[in-house]
Amino acid sequence: MVRVTLLGSAQDGGVPQAGSVHREGLDRRYPVAIGLVDSNGGRHLFDASRYLAEQLQIWNQTGVDSIFLTHAHIGHVDGLTLFGKEAMNCKGISLFCSDIMLDLIQKTPIWSIMLDQGVFTPYGNNIVKLPGVTVEALKVPHRAELSDMHAYIIKAEKSLLYLPDHDTWSETLNGHDLRSWLNHLEIDIALIDGTFYSYDELKNRKQEEIPHPPVEQTLQMLGERRDGDGEVVFIHLNHTNPLCMDETPVTELGWKVGKEGMSFSLG
């Protein structure tokens, strides 16, 4: 059986976020990541956060066979060092990422030494065939200070889209509407960027400097879930996102808010 487990549902800072005021009733959320188990039991981690120990427990695993990276922003890569000899002391983990991401890894001493030590064996991420499942990278526009950004389509009997980050729907969809884009990609389950609920959520920062399509806009584009629609699950929630406390605006339309431990069977 091919199965994906949601290991983290928060934006890179996690929930609660460092420096934020504690809010009563706010559940802990880890930086976004998913775990894929292929038909032979192979374990494949998508994004590597500093909460790796907790996320492996959620997944009921003690290690991984490969890692797929979306991009270089901190919450997606700051767990890579935990696979090195100071912690797990792994060898030969397949590391799938873009050429630009690999170039950054090779130029960053704390990561490049793990290539030299054989912790990771790097590969391109365009199309990767695993037992019973294929993983396809999909380049999407997102702040490229350090690397490019790739979503992933995980294809077995069902297909799952992992899209934790992107800048705007207009750039990503490139003239399509959201529903037709998901249908064109033949997506059954979409885990999509839900960082901010609204355009004016951040009160002390310029939100336009860290662009993400707000959930309000995505819900307007989706409307109510209809018979035959696939699942849409919002992930990568910022600690300011009111969905961390109340999921009703999403669930009343038939969609979902991601939570650690959610599991999706792909056949």
Image: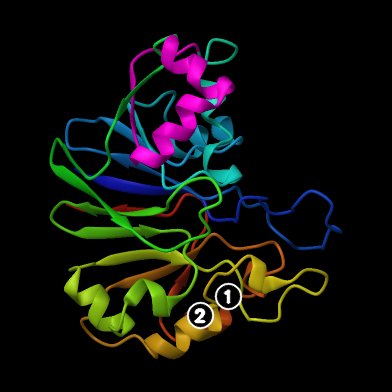
Q: Is residue 145 above or below residue 248?
A: above
Residue at image coords 80%, 75%: 203
Could you tell me residue 30's position as x and y percent? 60, 47
Question: Circle 1: is it few (<14), some (14-19), or many (20+) Cα within 10 Å?
Answer: some
Residue type at numbered disc 1: Glu
Is residue 19 left or right of 156 when viewed as pictured? right
Q: Secondary structure at mark 1?
A: loop
- Answer whether residue 229 is visible to the viewer in this image: no
**Could you say which is closer to the camera, residue 239 or residue 25?**
239
Could you tell me residue 266's position as x and y percent? 22, 53
Region rendered in magenta = 89-116
Could you tell me residue 174's position as x and y percent? 32, 78
Residue at label 2?
250
Q: Is residue 103 above or below residue 137?
A: above
Q: For the N terminus, which image quadrant? A: top left
Q: Secondary structure at mark 2?
A: helix
Residue type at numbered disc 2: Val
Label 2, label 1: how far apart the Cα atoms are: 6 Å
Residue at label 1?
247
As for residue 206 lying within the magenta part, the answer is: no
Q: Which mark is residue 115?
A: none
Q: Is residue 171 above or below residue 227?
A: above
Residue at image coords 70%, 62%: 239
**Could you say which is closer to the camera, residue 72 or residue 230?**
72
Q: Are marks 2 and 1 in contact (CB under 8 Å)?
A: yes
Is residue 222 left or right of 58 when viewed as pictured? left
Q: Is residue 22 above or below residue 240?
A: above
Residue at image coords 24%, 31%: 41
Residue at image coords 20%, 76%: 183
